[in-house]
């Protein structure tokens, strides 16, 4: 049984079905990318995985533990195992970077403030933000805000990290930095699901690619270099400013493998 | 300068206390009512929909009726129901009903200034409801709520003068009584003016203090 196993997710708005029997699976430490035209349900699908989008039906298995996503109590369980980084980050504007990171661990997980701050500072240092701990989010650049948002998500020690368009608000040269960071996190065993429009990053980074169209999964590519194997995915990527065949963003540690 | 007699001063003083009572009582009722109304308007539980609609209708209706009309409605309704309450209580009740509607609009608007993504971020961090309000929504909404709310409360202190219409002897009515007794009207009402100022000025100071404290955060 796969480590992450999402099946049969249906979302309805009135009579409209915005998501129809969507599903995917992933092993631990893999990077999954949702791609597809706008309005295809990528972000909706991502939001169902953390209980921000009510579903009509659907189940999610994480490491053999099955959650009925349509059950009212599922949101809390989903949020215990996953964390999300929003497109606009959603940092708390009136709190320092450090407090943004320690709020949930101290309030929800009841950890001591000292303990949480210690871990938060270590995490910030790892992400190159050691000197930003006491700064307010408004004084950070876009790339720094995103790293803080990622750090805040990691403080929850999630098994699954979700990212909604992590590269859309960044300068082109920052896009590569995020890619490297995500790859490093995945190598440490974090399973990552992202929605992305940056096709070069997608084809360089992804272990699995899920192509959505009209709320349905049209194609799933598995394994490195999967973008080129499936004609649907390759065609979509090539028409959306990407290169399915190679490692265009230069993110593979072993490009010749 | 004509000297006021002890009785005149006592009347003015009592009337000032009455105005403070009306403002304070109405203000406290209004704040409490506004919090309840705002909570209803923001509730997203399905069963709450009728109450939510009721809250919106209440706020939008009250804000479109002149104060004096609401006052008469409450006054005559209390009479019809045979409630044996003083005019002051009726006035405090009406002021509270009106203040609740206005303050609800300010409160609701302030809460809406907190970006949706921050509210969702608090949600997915699994913060319980009280913690979302205590740490994320409350502090940020406050900076958008406190200045207009206090501005409104200052304005509404002078609206309490309308309570004289149902027989409450408050500050402005005391001025009318004294001038009817033959005291020089200009001086009487200058006195009334100073007393209104004395009531509302501290509130303005409080507002400045709060704004500074919010800015520091």
Image (cartoon, rainbow, N blue to C red):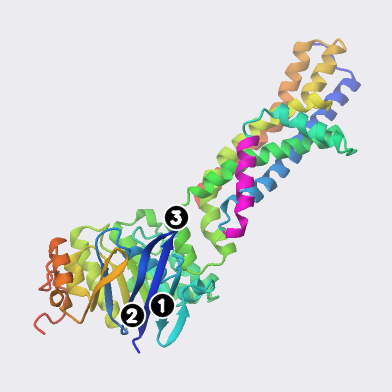
Asked if disc 3 and disc 2 are in contact, CB closer than 8 Å, the reply is no
Q: Which residues are magenta?
A: B45-62
Within-10-Å neighbours for mark 1: few <14, some 14–19, many 20+: some
Q: Which residue is mark 1?
A: A158
Q: Position of residue B160 (x, y in %)?
A: 73, 30
Asked if disc 2 and disc 1 are in contact, CB closer than 8 Å, the reply is yes
Q: Residue furthest left?
A: A256
From where the camera sits, is residue A210 visible?
A: no
Q: Is residue B48 magenta?
A: yes
Q: Quadrant of residue A136?
A: bottom left
Left or right position of B184 against B199: right
Q: Position of residue B129 (x, y in %)?
A: 57, 63
Relative vertical location of residue A179 with respect to residue A139 in this rendering, above or below? below
- Per the picture, the main secondary structure of the magenta-coloured stretch is helix
Q: Which residue is mark 2?
A: A190
Res B116 label: 3
Q: How many marks?
A: 3
């Amino acid at each position: 049984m796969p480590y992450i196993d999402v099946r049969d997710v249906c979302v309805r708005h009135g009579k409209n079905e915005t998501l129809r029997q969507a599903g995917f699976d992933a092993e631990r430490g893999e990077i999954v990318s949702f791609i597809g035209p706008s309005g295809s349900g990528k972000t909706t699908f991502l939001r169902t995985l953390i209980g921000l989008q009510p579903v009509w039906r659907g189940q999610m298995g994480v490491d053999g533990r099955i959650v009925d996503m349509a059950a009212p109590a599922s949101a809390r369980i989903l949020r215990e195992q996953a964390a999300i980084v929003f497109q606009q980050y959603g940092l708390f504007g009136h709190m320092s970077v450090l407090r943004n990171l320690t709020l949930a661990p101290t309030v929800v997980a009841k950890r001591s403030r000292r303990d949480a701050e210690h871990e938060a500072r270590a995490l910030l240092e790892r992400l190159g933000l050691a000197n930003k701990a006491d700064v307010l989010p408004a004084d950070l650049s876009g790339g720094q805000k995103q790293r803080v948002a990622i750090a805040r998500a990691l403080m929850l020690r999630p098994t699954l990290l979700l990212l909604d368009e992590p590269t859309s608000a960044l300068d082109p040269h920052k896009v590569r930095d995020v890619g490297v960071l995500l790859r490093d996190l995945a190598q440490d065993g974090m399973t990552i699901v992202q929605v992305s429009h940056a096709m070069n990053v997608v084809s360089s980074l992804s272990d699995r690619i899920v192509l959505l169209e009209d709320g349905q999964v049209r194609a799933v590519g598995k394994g490195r270099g999967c973008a080129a194997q499936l004609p649907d995915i390759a065609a979509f990527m090539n028409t959306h400013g990407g290169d399915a065949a190679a490692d265009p963003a230069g993110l593979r540690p072993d490009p010749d493998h | 300068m004509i000297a006021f007699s002890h009785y005149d001063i006592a009347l003015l003083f009592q009337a000032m206390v009455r105005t403070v009572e009306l403002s304070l009582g109405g203000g406290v009722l209004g704040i409490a009512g506004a919090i309840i109304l705002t909570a209803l308007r923001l509730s997203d539980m399905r069963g709450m929909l009728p109450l939510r609609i009721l809250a919106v209708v209440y706020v939008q209706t009250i804000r479109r009726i002149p104060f004096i009309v609401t006052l008469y409605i409450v006054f005559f309704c209390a009479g019809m129901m045979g409630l044996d309450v003083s005019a002051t209580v009726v006035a405090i009740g009406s002021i509270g009903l009106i203040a609740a509607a206005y303050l609800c609009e300010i409160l609701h608007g302030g809460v809406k200034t907190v970006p949706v993504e921050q509210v969702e971020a608090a949600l997915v961090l699994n913060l319980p409801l009280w913690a979302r309000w205590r740490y994320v929504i409350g502090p940020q909404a406050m900076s958008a709520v406190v200045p207009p709310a206090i501005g409104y409360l200052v304005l509404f202190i002078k609206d309490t003068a309308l309570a004289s219409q149902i027989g409450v002897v408050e500050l402005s009515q005391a001025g009318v009584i004294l001038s009817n007794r033959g005291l020089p009207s200009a001086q009487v009402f200058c006195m009334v003016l100073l007393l209104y100022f004395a009531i509302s000025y501290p509130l303005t100071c409080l507002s400045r203090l709060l704004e500074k404290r919010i800015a520091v955060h």
